[in-house]
Image (cartoon, helix red, strand yellow):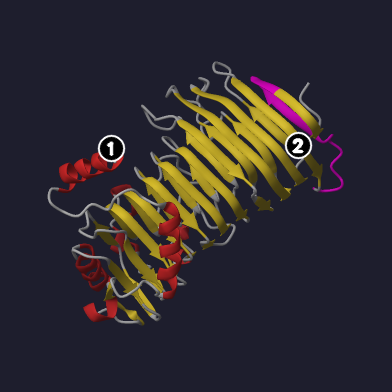
Amino acid sequence: MAAFAIVMMVCLVLIHGGQCKGLFNAAEALHKAKDAENGDVGPDVKAFNVLDYGAKPDGKTDSSINFRRTFEAACNFHGDAMMVIPEGEFLMGPVLFSGPCSNPSLLIIQVNGIVKAQSNMAYYRGGGDDDTDWITFQAIDGLIVSGRGTFHGQGSQVWGFNDCARKSNCVRLPATLKFIKVTDAIIRGIKSIDPKGFHIMISMSRNFRIFSVDLQAPGDSPNTDGIHMSKSDLVKISKTVIATGDDCVSMIHGSTNISIKKVICGPGHGFSIGSLGHYDDEADVSGIIVKNCSLRETDNGVRIKTYKTDSPSKASGIIFQDLIMTRVRNPIIIDQEYGNTKYSQPSKVRISDVHYINIRGTSASKVAVDLLCSASNPCQGIHLDNVNLQYAGPPNDDMPFSSNCRNARVAYHGYQSPPPCR
């Protein structure tokens, strides 16, 4: 009773006369997301169909303003609401879906059509550097994006403009789906193809569930991270397939309490924490678990990477467990000299309490465990427990199958292949 009273008082203070969504129930929200995919949401949910607001499912007519008007009508409705993107092909430029919304429960976005991005970069005013991504959800408390539909970024037409391989201060290309200041969200069932930049980007958000999504791009598509997050807490990703040209999942500064389970990764660059130490006053990274996942022919397996800068922060409480790797180039790697080798100072990022448990499969390189830590901040509390990797690279490589460790304090438990560092 006391807890209920506190919730109601908070609602009265924050909502200013609106309706309170109450405490987030993840199980109920996931069930609702599944129902939304099939349209089984019940008569109490009012549907707002983009067709009724003038959107054209012909794949040629720009429907950006029609999508925005549909969202605004659903968001401002003082009742349960669902924005409907039906079957058909819709062309759309950059759109901002901004709250706060007036719905008493989670706002539903049902996606069963194909939404294609405008390919001309003139629509995006220079890309993500000025916050112009493709579809942005902002300042929403309670959101479901669910369905059998597809977001097609038409990235192949603009990847040639990506110069991040040559410039460290490059402007990233627009993400397909960006969530900023969004809480209590479920993303389920949707597919993303060929984004210009990231498939999904999450920032300054809390309590996210990403479930059964399919993210696809060629292995050589530049900077097409599957799910990229920063300054976000309580993000859970499960039963998802990611095949892309960069990190399958990347977690940079301020990522805390992140769970990644039953994810299939490859091609791509694996699961990455970092790059860290890139900005001043970065928030710490902690509470990361990657478990029951598989990686196939990825450039990296599980990686922690930091720049050699004087920006201090911490990365701790990290678990990589029960992972299967198939011909992964760098299965286990800590790289605290990432990217900017021209700088002489060691990284100020402190890495500690990292556990690698039951990692098995094959490595495409002779150095399967590579722990390159900072000279001024050596890695502390690194644990390798039952690592069983076998070499499956070129047969004419005479180098021994090995581990490499520098400035790392490592404890070994159980079976170890490659052999432990000396």
Residue, far top: 376
* Quadrant of the rendered image containing residue 170: top left
| Precedes in sequence: disc 1 or disc 2 | 1
* Quadrant of the rendered image containing residue 158: bottom left
Task: Point out residue 333 in the picture as x, y percentages from the top left corner.
Answer: 64, 35
Task: Give the left or right position of residue 299, taking residue 422 as reference.
Answer: left
- Front residue (pair 19, 108): 19
Using the image, determine if residue 161 lies above or below residue 394: below
Residue, far front: 1
Label 2: state its secondary structure.
strand
Check disc 2 and give the amino acid type.
Answer: Val
Based on the picture, tell me whether residue 90 belongs to the magenta stretch.
no
Label 2: few (<14), some or many (≥20) within 10 Å?
A: many
Q: Where residue 387 is drawn, which disc sits there?
A: 2
- The residue shown at (72%, 41%) is 359
Residue, far left: 17
- The residue shown at (40%, 46%) is 207
Label 1: state its secondary structure.
helix
Task: Give the left or right position of residue 175, taking residue 76 as reference.
Answer: right
Q: Is residue 180 visible?
A: yes
Report which residue position mark 1 lands on.
2
Label 1: few (<14), some or many (≥20) within 10 Å?
A: few
Based on the picture, tell me whether residue 406 belongs to the magenta stretch.
yes
Q: Which residues are magenta?
A: 393-410
- The residue shown at (20%, 41%) is 9
Task: Point out residue 137 in the picture as x, y percentages from the top left corner.
Answer: 31, 56
